[in-house]
Amino acid sequence: MRLTDRRCLALAILSSLFCLTMPVLAQNAPLRVAVLPFEAQAGVALADAAAMTELVRSAIAVTNEFALIENQATQAILDETGFGDGPADLDDASRLLAERLDAAFALVGAMSAEDDSILVSVRLIDAATASVIFVHRTTSTVATIHREARLFAEGIANEVVAMTAGATVANIERLLSLGRLDEAARKLDAARLRAADAPESIPAALDSLERSINAGLADEAYKTARISVAQSDKAGKDFETRDTLMASARESGNDALFLIPDGAAWIKQREKYLDFMLNDVMSYYAAEDRSRREAIVAASREALRQGSPDEALRIIDDYVQVAGERAIDRTVKTVLDAAKAARADGFITAARSATAVSDYARAERLLFEAAKAGTQPARLASQQVRLETVMWRDEVARVKAERFASSMWDPASRPRFLLEAGIDLATFDTPSATWPLGGVTPLPRLSVALYERVSGPILFDWRFALRAGNSEWSGALDTGNASVSYWRTDAGLLAGFTVAVRNIDAGLGAGTLFGAAGFAGNMDAYGTAVILEPTLAPYLGAAVRAKLRYRWRKRFGAGIDLERSLTWSPKAGTSAGLAIGFFAEASF
């Protein structure tokens, strides 16, 4: 085709479009908008603010709802008013824009940055009154702003259209007839937004238009999906590109199913979309999923064969993280259970080894990990019982060792002083003036002892004891009756040695005794009463005492001792005695 032919064709198309839009332009001339340069505030470069300004201008221009005022004309008024030097200059600038350039609106923006965040704020100003129509603020990151600045600018333009441009049924129908579906959707949203306060005024035609728009958008999404599938087929073995294209096809296909309206008019169209999704899109994913699952199972089994259940579990977990729980079918579950069992078996074996070397904390952690696997319950229970048995046995041994090694059983740490209370059962070899009748006399005893360590478990002790007792006897004596009472009081100082073995003490001591004994009574013989005069006999003596004591606390104990004594009294002469004693003691 020659250049002149192309020009003629272009002129014919433009003439047709001009004829279609002429009634609209005649009835409602587009509003004039001045987009002021965005202000670059803290942290934002002038070039970034200028780029955002141009993106917003372009997005507003694409809507075909406004006539943009050229930058040169706008800048001349800004320079004249000094706009940018202070916030008060906006009133003058907007007034001159309205008067000289017939501007209906002025769009003012600013960008500021802090750390990695960027704040973009936009105000739409009524040029005639300098009043704010709406404010748009968005916080984003540097990377997002640079990547999606165009979409952000389109969002601003869409909001400008929705808030200012006329959205009528006629305009929406014209845009729909020209295939301008996005603009028609914006007009429809604007119409519903303006009529939100008066629902009864919403034309019924809006619902029909919305269905038509959605049907058109659904068809566009369907066509986009088919293009993505065709490109995926051409990608061959470039699996990454194929996955990306098929993901796009699935997304577009889902959009088409979501947008297609309900109703008999669109049943065939919906069936076509469903057939496409099932046979062209989902079949691809089913085949890919099956192939990937087989590869995962093979890799996991190889890891198990090499004795690495953790690696097998990692492979399966990575796959499930991407594919979801639904990906665990019978084959995946089989290898998953085998990996868990192998991992649990490894933990149990390691726990047994840790138990053998008394590393119980590690053994417990390993058994806990084995329990999380949920397999090998019998082996796990057996090892747990074994661990607890060994732990309790060692704990008992440790407690005993600590008990016997503690200060409670250490003779060197025993208190130096001891207070002892007991009773001696004393008897004497021969009767005498002091003990005329012989027999056993109970003698309560109180002792104080002082201990000094000699070597190891051997202690040297000094013991001072006091004891006193009395007894009575009555009965027949030869040809008469007698009643006699006698008493004894003495003190002793004994020195000796004690051997302490754990909680048992054995000791031997010797020393002196001194005290007094006496008796008094009466006797009836041949009808004659005879009163025995009270007799007091002081005495001296020597004694040897052996003892055996059990201590169940550091400061308390009880025991038994045996004393052999020899005493001499000026009145009673010499007498030998034997006493067996029982006592309890407290140390301090």
Image: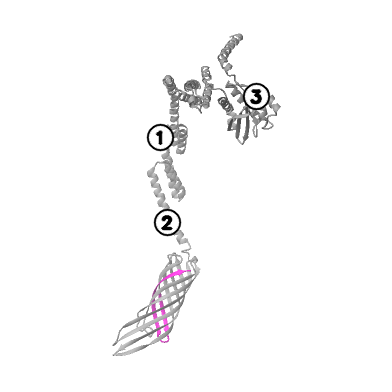
Q: Give the residue number, with chain letter if any, for mark 2.
A: 396
Kind of residue sitting beneath label 3: Ala
Query: Mark 1 belongs to which amino acid?
Result: Lys
Under circle 3, the secondary element is helix
Depth check, front residue: 569 or 369: 369
The amino acid type, in three-letter code, at marker 2 is: Val
Residue carrying label 3: 98
**Looking at the image, which is closer to me, 298 or 129?**
129
Q: Left or right of 134: which side holds 385?
A: left
Q: Is residue 217 above or below residue 540?
A: above
Q: Secondary structure at mark 2?
A: helix
Q: Circle 1 — which element?
A: helix
x%, y% of residue 467?
Answer: 42, 77
Nearer-the-camera pick, 40 or 531? 40
Q: Residues within 10 Å of mark 2 (few under 14, many from 20)?
A: few
N-terminal of the pair, mark 3 or mark 1, is 3
**Residue 170 seen anywhere in this rendered image of the structure:** yes
Q: Is residue 246 visible?
A: no
Q: CA distance from mark 2 to mark 1?
A: 45 Å
Magenta region: which residues? Answer: 562-588
Q: Which residue is mark 1?
A: 333
| Marks 3 and 2, how far apart at CA | 97 Å
Sequence order check, earlier mark of 2 and 1: 1
Left or right of 415? Residue 522 is left
Q: Earlier in the sequence, mark 3 or mark 2?
A: 3
**Percent x, y of residue 344:** 42, 42
Residue 121, image quadrant: top right
Comparing marks 2 and 1, which lies closer to the viewer? 1
Residue 80 vertical position relative to residue 460 in the rendered view, above or below: above
Displayed quadrant of residue 122: top right
